[in-house]
Structures are given as C-alpha cells and as structure tokens.
Amino acid sequence: MKAKPRDIPAILKALDPKMRAVLVFGRDDGLVRERAEKIGKQICEDLSDPFQVARPGSSDIKESPSILLDEVAALSMMGGRRLVRLESVGNEATEAVKLVLDSDAGDGLLVITAGDLKPTSSLRKLLEGAKNAIAIACYEDSAQDIMGLVQTVLGNAGLTATQDAVAYLVDNLGGDRMVSRSELDKLVLYKGSAGGQVTIEDAKACVGDTAALGLNQIAEAVTAGNLKQLERFLERAWTSGESAIAILRTLQNRMMRIHLARGFMDQGMSAGEAVGKLRPPVFFGERDKFMGEVSRWSARKVETALDILIEAELACKTTGNPADTICARALLRLAKAAR
C-alpha cells in the first residue's frame, strides 16, 4: 500500500506487524536513511547486529533471487523477528521482493531503500499494490519540515530558540535531512549541556549556508545519481563563485575513494569491510550511503568516470570554452550513469 503523508509519523513509531516489507524511497537520501533506520529499529535496536540483521546486496539477488525469502524466513538466533535490509536498489530487485510478498514463510521484516523511483517503477508498483507491504516516499524537506526538525532536535536537547534564530536556521539549512540534522547536532554541541536559548549569533556561529552545501555535497549528488540535487547545488556553487576545477577535483577524490573500496571488494571483502579500510575513514552517519555508492559503481565504471573528469579539467584549461559549462556537462553525464 502507499503511505499517506499524514500516516507516516505513526508508521515510524509502530509498524503494523502484518507488514512483511517496507520500501522507503525518494530524492532525499538523508530522509530515506533516517526513516529506514527508524523502522528497522522497531525490530532490532542495534542495526549492526549480525545475528538479527541481514544485508544481502544486489549481486546476491542477481545470483540467487530466492535469497531474500530465505533471509526473511530464517529464524533469529537471538529470538524475535529478523530484520533484512536491502539498500540502494531498483527494479532489478522486483522479482526477489515479490517472492517474499507471495510467501508466508517466516516473520522477518524486509526494509528496502531506493532512490527516486518513478510511478511506473515495477518495484514501487509492487509495494504500493500489496496488502502486506507499504511504500513510503521521501522528498526534500519543505520550510515547514525544516522548522519541525529544528524544534525537535533543539527540544530533545533541552534548548529553545529565539524567533530570528529559527528563521535563520530554516533559511540556511538544506533540503537533505541528514545534512540538516548534522548541522543541528553541531549547534547542540556548541551550546553544551547547560541548555538555554539559541540566539541568532549562536546559529550563525555553527550553521553556515548549508543550502550551498559545498564541493563535497556536489560530488555526493553525482555519485548518488541525484540529478535534482546536483542542479541545485551547482547553481549555488556558481553563484558563490566556486571554481569548476575545484569541483572536478573534489569529485575525482571521491571517485578514487570509491575505486579503492571496489578494489578491496574485488579481493573478497564485503562492502562494509571495504569502506571500513578507507583512510581518512568515512563518517559513521555517511557509511550506509557510501556503501550503496560503492556497490553501484563497478571498478571499470569508476575508471571511465575518472577519464571523463580528467578530460573535462584539461578542456577547462585549454579550449577557451566556458569552464562552468564543461564542468556541468561532465557532472551531469556521470550522474546519469550513476542512475
């Protein structure tokens, strides 16, 4: 079934136990991860528990479509329901998910995350049409959503905020839930444990213009295949005077980290083990997202992407054509490849 926006808060608190699968999808990667984790923690508080949580990947499903049903039907070694997490997938998972929904074996819960699935997507249509599954759409936070997040995070920390501080935060936090929450967590840490009121000076000291998000967020939008975010971030980067060369090199660095992790995986490591070996380490809150990107980009695909980026940088320096245009075309080409 399709989750109605007004029903989502209740679902995140207590999912109907009759549900065998939940699909969380949309353009806001941070909100997708946050909601998927809230649902998963209804089954298992520690999502890294290998005895109660299974994480099959796209390659596993391709080799054996029945693996999802096997994992959902398996008994938990610790008792209780078993959680199966299927991350960053698309229509290639439809048949495997259908096997789970058509069977009543086991009582495990399958939680699926995906990007911006169109209404015609076979995976989305399957979950929205099933009586024992639910699909939750996640889109960029509106001003009202951001205000609610500000009030929730500050309230949980025992903080209040002046009206102008709230207005500043709403104006300057971005559309990605995970980024916004990270910025607010920095503000809470800045205020310390004494509580009190957040002033606009506090807000400005901790939260910059995260709507711009910086070069790293542009690179993340490309490797995640998020075209809408890429367009918005690039527009703000040009407005703030960012260099096309700096943008290209930031993306090159991210691609090289993905390539290194793919190399570890080709040696037999899991995605989690491969990402864990990267130095500097991947921030904990970004691990799931980065693991999904590592799984999406093959070593050969990354090598092709690096060639495209090097050619674009050379063209920016030698052809006399607008560097912004050359950069934007290269990034758009790679973001489409990621999708």
Image (cartoon, rainbow, N blue to C red):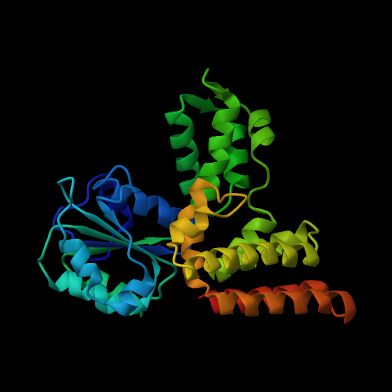
Query: Where on the picture, by quarter, is residue 33?
Result: bottom left
Q: Position of residue 326 (x, y in %)?
A: 76, 77
Residue at image location 56% in from the left, 51% down from the top:
282
Query: In this picture, is 332 found above or below 42?
Result: below
Look at the image and tell me in which quarter the N terminus lies: bottom left
Q: Position of residue 50 (x, y in %)?
A: 30, 51
Q: Position of residue 26 (x, y in %)?
A: 43, 64
Query: In this picture, is 237 found above or below 303?
Result: above
Query: In this picture, is 37 found above or below 303?
Result: above
Could you tell me if residue 92 is visible in this image? Answer: yes
Q: How many marks?
A: 0
Work out which residue is located at the far left of the displayed protein and give it: 104
| Left or right, residue 230 beside residue 42 | right
Could you tell me if residue 325 is visible in this image? Answer: no
Residue at image location 76% in from the left, 63% down from the top:
238
Q: Position of residue 129 (x, y in %)?
A: 22, 73
Residue at image location 46% in from the left, 42% down from the top:
149
Work out which residue is located at the far front of the displayed protein and give it: 267
